Image (cartoon, grey):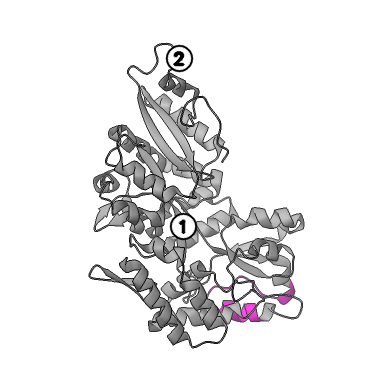
């Protein structure tokens, strides 16, 4: 999203908000201004302007003042804001970040509103679970994104294969697609988000909570089975064993035309077609197959939750804003505008006309997030899962490598 330069200290998204900045005669005396922090590229200018105009029209005396924040360095900025006084009223945070902010004891408990007003029983688990800490809901699911299989229809047709319905068939088809001229799949060796889904599909975990003490769990039999499947799949292409999906960008590798499949979010489509416009009408999509026929694999769900700090100056008004953003009308508008999965499985039909997004929305019904520890960010900062994956793909003993990585995860979560 483009951050517009306005006279007000914050990026005001409506002309009506000028009164709150003292730019209109007599403005601001009875107006409540709700200050909102949203992350860059989470919404389009058009969506934000439409939401703001509609909301302010329906809520007399309320103005929305939106600041667009960058992801880089946002953790420290949010922590300082919720610990201080008079900070923002509503903040968008990554779904896996809620635990670290809740650990400050400075977030408003939204459990009542979740059950009474927002239909929390139908939320996507990959958004709802990381927003819930010790039985209290601090993060309200806003939007989701997950990985799907993006494939080249021409290469599938030439090989005589169709999108697989289960994992065994998928592996066999990928092997058939993989020959001297075509990579059956381009899968980088350190795509740990994809690995997470395979581990969860087997019933394993990245880490487990043992009475308040977290421990790495990559060495469990189930987690090792997930890694073994990843290894077999990754071998059916030429993805690097010692790099992640951004090095080089897998969308650019797919765009060359000799890769049958990649595992990526629908956002990769723009990069693919930019690099190779000729592929625009040759792209197909299906959920990552699971072990059972017709049931997608468990996938990592990324996305955002909305939080309200305890110190929010306009808490009551902030609650109404969150209810609107997380409610059915604006969930549909946001999903269609940004190609997101809405926050409820029951709302998946709102993107039925967008094939890739609809495929993703179906997949997120079985989505999960990373372990709900306040220290999980410390694990990702120096991620031991990546070198573990490279070690196994390079032929090292999987059990021993998993034990080493699990110990590092345990140490990081204990800090």
User: Label 1 neighbourhood size at 10 Å, few (<14), some (14-19), many (20+)?
Assistant: many
- Give x and y (percent) for residue 172: 61, 81
Q: Residue furthest top?
A: 25
Reading the chain from its start, which is encountered first: label 1 or label 2? 2
- Which disc number belongs to residue 107? none
Left or right: residue 312 versus residue 298 is left
Residue in front for this viewpoint, 312 or 136: 312
- Which disc number belongs to residue 302? 1
Look at the magenta stretch and give its main secondary structure: helix
- Give x and y (percent) for residue 400: 43, 86
- Give x and y (percent) for residue 126: 40, 59
Residue in front for this viewpoint, 170 or 251: 251
Left or right: residue 71 versus residue 135 is right
Residue numbers of the magenta segment: 158-175
The residue at which mark 2 appears reads as: 24
Q: Quadrant of the N terminus?
A: top right
Q: How many marks?
A: 2
Q: Looking at the image, which residue is at 52% across and 58% down?
A: 360
- Give x and y (percent) for residue 367: 43, 63
For residue 315, say whether it is visible: yes
């Amino acid at each position: 999203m483009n951050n517009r330069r306005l006279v007000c200290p914050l990026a005001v998204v409506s002309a009506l908000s000028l009164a709150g900045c003292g730019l209109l005669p007599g403005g601001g005396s009875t107006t409540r201004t709700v200050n909102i922090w949203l992350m860059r590229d989470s919404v389009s200018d058009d969506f934000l302007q439409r939401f703001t105009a509609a909301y302010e029209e329906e809520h007399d005396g309320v103005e929305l003042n939106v600041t667009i924040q960058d992801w880089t360095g946002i953790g420290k900025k949010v922590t300082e804001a919720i610990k201080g006084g008079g900070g923002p009223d509503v903040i968008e945070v990554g779904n896996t970040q809620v635990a670290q902010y809740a650990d400050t004891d400075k977030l408003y408990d939204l459990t009542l509103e979740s059950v009474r007003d927002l239909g929390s029983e139908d939320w996507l688990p990959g958004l709802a679970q990381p927003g819930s800490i010790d039985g209290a809901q601090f993060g309200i699911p806003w939007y989701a994104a997950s990985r799907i299989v993006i494939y080249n229809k021409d290469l599938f047709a030439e090989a005589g294969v169709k999108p697989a319905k289960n994992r065994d068939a998928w592996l066999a088809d990928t092997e058939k697609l993989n020959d001297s001229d075509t990579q059956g799949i381009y899968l980088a060796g350190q795509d740990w988000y994809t690995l997470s889904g395979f581990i969860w599909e087997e019933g394993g975990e990245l880490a487990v909570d043992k009475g308040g003490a977290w421990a790495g769990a990559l060495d469990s039999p189930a987690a090792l089975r997930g890694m073994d499947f990843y290894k077999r799949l990754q071998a059916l292409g030429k993805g690097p064993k010692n790099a992640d999906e951004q090095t080089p960008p897998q969308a650019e590798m797919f765009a060359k035309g000799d890769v049958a499949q990649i595992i990526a979010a629908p956002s990769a489509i723009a990069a693919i077609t930019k690099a190779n416009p000729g592929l625009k009408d040759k792209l197909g999509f299906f959920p990552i197959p699971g072990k059972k026929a017709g049931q997608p694999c468990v996938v990592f769900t990324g996305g955002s939750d909305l939080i309200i700090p305890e110190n929010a100056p306009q808490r009551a008004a902030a609650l109404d804003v969150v209810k609107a953003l997380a409610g059915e009308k604006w969930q549909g508008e946001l999903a269609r505008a940004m190609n997101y999965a809405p926050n409820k499985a029951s709302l998946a039909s709102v993107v039925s006309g967008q094939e890739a997004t609809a495929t993703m929305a179906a997949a997120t019904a079985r989505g999960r997030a990373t372990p709900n520890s306040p220290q999980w960010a410390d694990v990702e900062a120096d991620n031991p899962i990546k070198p573990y994956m490279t070690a196994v793909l390079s032929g090292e003993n999987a059990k021993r490598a998993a034990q080493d990585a699990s110990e590092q995860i345990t140490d990081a979560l204990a800090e």
